[in-house]
Amino acid sequence: MKRIPMMLQLAVILFCVMAVPAIILTLFSGTQILRYSEKAIAESSLAGLDANRRLNENALNNLAQDTVRLTASRVFDRVRPFENYRELQEDYNHVSQALTVLRELVNLNNRVNGVYSSFFYLSGADYVISTDKGITTTDRYEPIGWMEKVLEGRRGISGVWVPRRLSSGETVISYVLPLNRLSTTTRGTIVVNLRESQIGEYLRSAEPADHGYLLMQADGLIISHNDKAVLFTDGTKQPNMQEILESQAREGYSFHELHGERLLYNWSRSDLFGWWNVNVYSMDALMAKTNKLQHNIVWLTAAVIFAGSVLTVFLATWLSKPLRRLVRTVRSSGSRGVADKNELTFLDAVFKRMQEEEEQLYKLLQEREQDVRSLAVHRLLRGEEVQPATELFPEPYSLVGVLSIDRYRSYADMTNPETRSYHRYLIVTHGETLFPPGVVARCVYQGEGCFAVVINFGQEEVDRDYEGIKSALEALSQYAGDLLGHTVTVGVSSRTEKNAGLQDRAAEAMEVIKQRMVDGGGGISFWSEEEERGKPYLYPVDSERRILNFLQAGNLERLLEELSVIRGEIQSAPSISYDNIMFIYHQLVGVTIKELRENQMNPTRIFAGRGNIYSAIASIDTLDELDHYMREFYRDILQYLARRPESEPGHGERILRYLDAHYCEEIVFENMAKEIGISYSYMRKIVFEMTGTSLIDYMNLRRIEKAKGLLLESGMTVKQIAAEVGYVNIQSFNRFFRKYEGMSPSSYKASKLRSSG
């Protein structure tokens, strides 16, 4: 793409802008047309079916009402006296009365289309009066015994509709109506036979895609169908009919596939008769016009796309002309390190290069300005004279705040140098923006987790009792705590004038910070003058003597209780300085080491993994941490004294076996020490004595050895290898690999491959 001419790219883009939406719109509209056409056709067909159902119901109701009216006319009373055929034929008047009944039946047939025949049967007589065979005996007519069975379930005085096949082969729907006792004393039954084909005429749709119709009773018996061979069979055996009968909907439609043809089923259930009216249509035939319309839309879209393509080429040529002229001009003045690119890529690369150069220049200027300010602040805090001091701090008053990270050693152990550097940058830059207008703040990092903030302000801030400065320092403390994941302590000095004595103010702020040893960390404290002269140093002489006694006796429990007593005395002292606390614990360490040496014991072997004990104590922030450190200090001594000569190798072997088995995992050394049954500091000492390296170095050396093998023997990437041997990120892996091998992992692999080649 980067080498394709700009005019061609522009033409492709314009074509896509025009063609793609058109194609998507065509496909979408076609799909919607088909979907909504199907829905509209289905609903329209359902409405037609419902109309046909009502037409059929009206025709049947009219026939039933005409039959009821005939019974109310008392015409059948004329033949009531004649119970047998012979008696009826004896007299012409008798026959005339029967013919009158026959004429009424014929008139009834003529009132409704499709009536095949009708007859009247006088209860107990041996003859019937019918429109198809006249007046004849029952043994010469259709069997009439079925009437008694169908009338058994009749309710009320209305008749019943019965589908049946006559002996002549004609399929009819018979309306059977017994004479009403309320309107006549004659006992008999009228039967009107309506052709099944007439019902089919009512149900058959006028749609050209009509695939068939079906009329079923509630029990599923087919009473009308376009295929006469399935009449009076079980409708549930027909395709998809079981699903319709089980449906709870009174009417509806559904689509089904049958023998590769898509069919539409419409159904409507009659509330009057309980019959199911079903019509089946071929969707292919119904959708013929819609499909033709969709094809026409596709062809029209294709024509529009073709015309748009021609227009696109013309627009691309016209629009790209100024850009091509600009590219030629820029290339003639120098490619700025960019070559073999098309016009758009060339311009993009050139402008990015210019932007990068501008950003680098601006960043360099900012860094120079920041470095000059930071250097000036550092010099002021050291008590040196700085020429542009009034430009940095123009207001008449200044004070110094020191922000110190609590438990800095823990924070440093949990983060790498790059992360700590980034945190320092954020705190320095963000801290200067939190102060209100009229207050100038300059923040610098002084090392060991301490940031100094020189705050310059005027009389207005003094009158407000430093409200703006206090709010800003609280915000800075909150921000630093959230960023570092550690609490921070802020100490604030007294006020000075004209930037004089900033060195002393910084010392005051540091003295305030030291008070967290007693007060605890995580707060903001201000300097207050206190009379220190004449106050004697607190030192627990009795506790020192008891600790040495317990140490000689090997009584760890009582020794730890004595440390708690010392801590309680420090906390209960009305005012005790940081230096006094340091003196107490340094003195305890000193007399303990002296006691060990006097008893011919080498403290170096005991505390090999602890480093410089005095420096470690001096770096501790709070009394809680200091008390914990001293407890571990004495626990290590007593473990060393109580240990049997053969016990140490046993612990060492367990430690090294555990490290060899789990060095690729994230090991919590404190938990590991508890599992082995020794203290963490004692475990570090054992590893150092057995391997000559620290616990961390031993684990990292095992990881690097494993990684060297994977680099040469596997096809894994450096990132995958780093994760395989236990490093959470590739930066840590690269740093430790370079530390132990003097080169990066990729360089090591390349050198080994060259030497083997």
Image: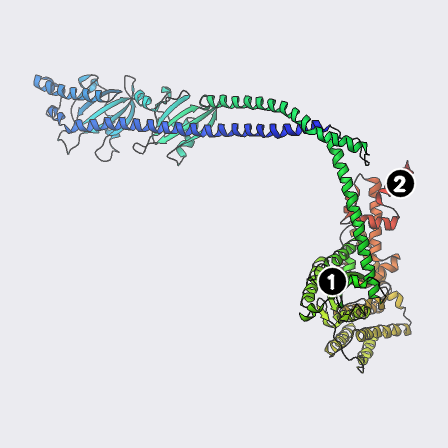
Above-or-below relation of 194 to 634 = above
For numbered disc 1, what is the local secondary structure?
strand
Q: Which residue is drawn at 55% across and 27% down?
A: 26
For numbered disc 2, what is the local secondary structure?
helix
Task: First in sequence, mark 1 or 2: give its number.
Answer: 1
User: 10 Å neighbourhood of mark 1: few (<14), some, or many (≥20)?
Assistant: many
> What residue sits right under mark 2 in the picture?
752
Q: How many labels does the image show?
A: 2
Residue 592: which quarter of the image? bottom right
User: 10 Å neighbourhood of mark 2: few (<14), some, or many (≥20)?
Assistant: few
Q: Residue 440 carries which label?
A: 1
Question: Please, what is the three-letter code of the amino acid marked with disc 2?
Answer: Lys
Q: How far apart are marks 1 and 2 (CA)?
A: 58 Å
Question: Please, what is the three-letter code of the amino acid marked with disc 1?
Answer: Val
Q: Quadrant of the C terminus?
A: top right
Let me know if residue 700 appears in the view. Answer: yes
In the figure, is residue 752 to the left or right of 509? right
